[in-house]
Amino acid sequence: MEGNVGRCLKTITGKIEALTREPGYIYTLALILLRDLFHSVEEIADINPRDHLNFQEITFLVGLLVKHDPDFTYPTEDESSRRFELTYRLFEELHWKHHEPFLQELAGLAKDGRGTETREENYRRVFGAGTMMTEPIFYSGSGAYDFQYLEFAVGKYRSDAAWIQEHVGVDIGDMARIARELKLLHERKFNSLVSQPPGEFPDICQAGLSVFCFTENDLQQFGPAVKPFLGAFSLAPGALNSKLELPGQYNELQSRPIVRLPDGRYFLPIGFNLSEAIYESPFFWMNTDAAYVNAALLHRGQFAEAATAELVRSVFGANNVYSDVEIRERKGCALTDIDVLAIVGNKAVIVQVKSKRLTELAKLGDEKRLVDDFELAVQEAYDQGLLSRRALVDRKNSLFVNGNEIHLTEAIDDAYILCVTVDHYPAVTHQVDVYLKKSPGDPFPIALSIFDLDVLAFYLRDPFEFAYYLRQRVALSDYFKADSEMTLLGRHLKQKLFKSGDADKEMLDNSYAQLIDANFQVVRGSVPRTDAADNLRSQWKNEEFLKLVDQVKTAQEPRFTDALFFLYDLAGKGADDLIKLLKLTKRKAAADHQGHDARLLFSGIHTGITILCEFDSSLVLRKKLLALAEIAKYKSKADVWLGLGCVATRSRLVDAVVFAKYAWRDDPELEELAAHLRGKMMSPSGGKIGRNQRCLCESGKKFKHCCGK
């Protein structure tokens, strides 16, 4: 980072480094760690992140500390309190200095306007500037959970196990087990500390630091694996990180997060960094071996695709997911290929996997490197996914896996593009917003890490719900702005991704991601269960509507995926009203042994529903439902229409489903049939429309002179 902002940042970080050199600062650091790293699950959902240092800030702070041998002189309580407060004040100043270029741009826009720039050019210049991008990169979330790093590390290096054992002396499985034990050791020591009386301040300092310290004897159960493990992941402070001056620069603490202390103890300030290092570092070790580097690269790519495919299969099922799919034109020429393809009805999910990382220069705000890295990590994957999407929707091409053609049961009419990186790629949602090159009308991709995909696959286990989330994400990519995929997922799980009003854009804060933090770690067994884990639950729940959705899933009618999406769009009051009307129609048919029907028309969105209930004949039901729904769609001048049929003598809410989605057009034959249409027209609330009310088809006429004739 160059220029005045870079110089100012270095001035601030210089003050932070000077603070770390003060006698006994390591004890103040321990108190900061206790405050900012140990949160109960109840606190995670409601905590204000701005009041605490995040993982990146603490890692940078400790990275500055280990540049020199720490002094272990006990400070006075007043000295430590001053350093404590000054540390937070300097990091707050550092944060605001990152914001300064943005504030200057806003001031310039307010004074001079955009000049000759278009709105899009202005947005790209302001939000895509390198100085602007350093802030979301450094202050973004950690990108993964510690247990995810450890779980994926085992699979990532399975093919490299022999090299790692020979050159490091400890396998990945033992590395992960030792990391988990150290985390538990930290927690036990912390719980013991908070249960003891405070004592004198030097005692507090000693006890606080000891929470983050351990000896080899604490790991004796791991036998001969301990020494090579500590050799691989520990460092001795002093003469380290000589070039570390700014956030984003290489910090040796990220590769070797354990600090060796003079008294023989080991200091692990941030356990999360150890899990990340176990996932990341072995690849760089193998890169130093010229004879093995090509094999390591091959294994890395194989893991990326295999792990991604496994996550996708966990949602869509093995029979609906294909790897290394080749798309051929009619003449047999290869057109493109897809890393992972998932099919759900008439929808597809195209997944392109990349192993590109964000480089150090990009993290420091070098705009050219930012764009170049994005090109390799996301843009290339998107371009390939877009070509594949066009080929799928075109329906003139063939799909092959290992030379065998795939025959789909339904023609694909839409496909969602996922660009997956095997490593955490900071601020990727923001970079898609400003750097992505696409033509008007082309859909946005969803760029995320394999760790984000793991979370999505956990919460959206049903393939239709997963595909529906992707549909909403793509459709609203230009509307919702968020720091991470977890923020968007949290919003969806809590209250669905719908527009809130008439605004052009909506900014989502990290509170939605915090809901996932409080829940995911509990349900995955990483932390004990508490009431805070339930804060993620949806704000509405209608058990009968969920049963209706499940019954529509089993219908297997053409385009039933679209019918499900239509129902998901109703979630909330619309779902409640639909169930009420279905049950009312069914009760009437049961009472008089006659067929009954009703229509729901949703004004403003040109959609509606026909409900038909026959007393006991499913044959009559199926014959009548399609025609009745088509006529109702025409009469209502709607573009989208759902038909739900049920039999009064059966327990199911729905026994037949039809769905139509095409633009309304004049049709003399349907016009004549529509003139004889009977049945009640209902409002979305379930009430009958008054004859003198404005018609819901938005013709401007009264209901009695329009659809109510």
Image (cartoon, helix red, strand yellow):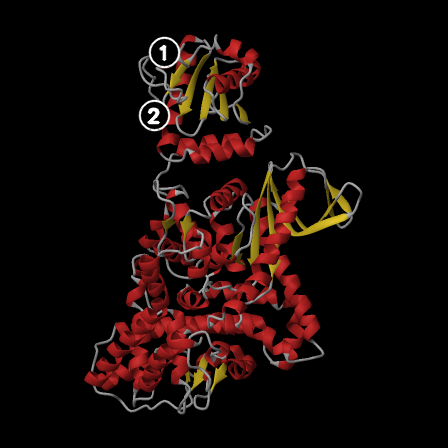
> SS of the residue at dot 2?
loop
Query: Closest to the observer: 37 or 68?
Result: 68
Q: Quadrant of residue 487?
A: bottom left
Give the residue type that dot 1 points to. Lys
Density class for disc 1 (Cα within 10 Å; few <14, some 14-19, many ≥20) is some
- Quadrant containing the N terminus in the rendered view: bottom left
> How far across and down, in percent of the image, does residue 328 sit?
75, 45
Residues at marks 1 and 2, CA–CA distance in whole angstroms: 19 Å
Q: Are marks 1 and 2 in contact (CB under 8 Å)?
A: no
Q: Where 581 falls versus 508 (above or below)?
A: above
Density class for disc 2 (Cα within 10 Å; few <14, some 14-19, many ≥20) is some
Task: Judge whether residue 443 can be spotted in this image.
Answer: yes
Residue that carries the numbered disc 1 in the rendered image: 704
Task: Judge whether residue 269 can be spotted in this image.
Answer: no
> How far across and down, in percent of the image, does residue 610 sit?
46, 20
Query: Closest to the observer: 414 or 83?
Result: 414
Query: Closest to the observer: 224 or 328?
Result: 328
Q: Where 602 falls versus 571 (above or below)?
A: above
> How far across and down, in percent of the image, does residue 82 sit?
22, 81
**Mark 1 or 2, which is nearer the eye?**
1
Q: What is the total number of numbered labels drawn onto the structure image?
A: 2
Q: Quadrant of residue 101?
A: bottom left
Which is nearer the N-term, disc 1 or disc 2? 2
- Quadrant containing the C terminus in the rendered view: top left
Which residue is situated farthest in the right direction here? Answer: 331
Q: Where 115 falls versus 51 (above or below)?
A: above
Q: Any mark on residue 685, and which?
A: 2
> SS of the residue at dot 1?
helix
Residue occupying image coordinates x 45% and y 27%: 606
In the displayed structure, does residue 658 sit left or right of residue 519? right
> How far across and down, in percent of the image, does residue 248 sit?
45, 74
Give the residue type that dot 2 points to. Ser
